[in-house]
Image: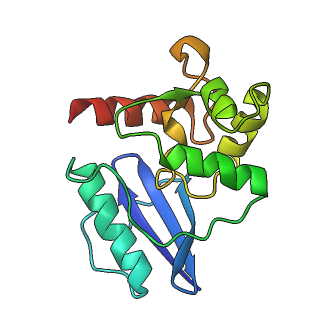
Amino acid sequence: MSILRLNSMLGVIEMEEADGALFRCSLLPEAAPELEAIPRKAAAAPVLAEAEQQLNEYFCHLRREFDLPLAARGTPFQKAVWAQLEAIPYGETRTYGQIAAALGRPKAARAVGMACHANPLWLIVPCHRVVGAHGALTGYACGIETKQALLEWEQES
């Protein structure tokens, strides 16, 4: 198991891998000015080095989707929601209700929201692309400001 922390335009991103797969990617609440800014030296674990490279490309508008081995831990319902999140194209959004309907559970919009909140692969599995009814920016584990910044970032390219 290896951990990598790196600075990004949004703050410190911490990624964790085990057995060659990424199972956690988080935006940490604290600043870490002692860390080098992206780009920096590659991580020791190959999947972390690749994740770092892909994040660099994303933040330079050179990558629209991530292609990494993932091993998110969650319930079957959460995993089904996260698979739907991965299918949302770069620069587009879906509502919680649309995702619930796609799962065949049209009344499960709140449960979809909880699964998004529990997403352990922030940004890699793009829960920021899920909005409330009528496009309202509602709920985001990393804060509404971060969600808005990511959506605006994707619209710029």
Relative to the observer, which residue lies in front, 152 or 84?
84
**Residue 54 at least partly seen:** yes
Residue 45, quarter of the rendered image: bottom left
Whole-percent x and y of residue 54? 31, 63
Residue 136, quarter of the rendered image: top right
Residue 8 placement, left or right of 56: right
Whole-percent x and y of residue 148? 44, 28
Residue at 65% x, 46% y: name it.
81
Residue at 64% x, 65% y: name it.
72
Q: Quadrant of the N terminus?
A: bottom right
Residue 19, quarter of the rendered image: bottom right
Residue at 51% x, 84% y: name it.
20
Q: In which quarter of the image is the C terminus?
A: top left
Residue 64 placement, left or right of 82: left
Q: Can you say whether 115 is above or below 73 in the image?
A: above
Relative to the observer, which residue lies in front, 94 or 16?
94
Whole-percent x and y of residue 125? 51, 52
Residue at 40% x, 88% y: name it.
44
Q: Can you say whether 42 is above or below 13 in the image?
A: below
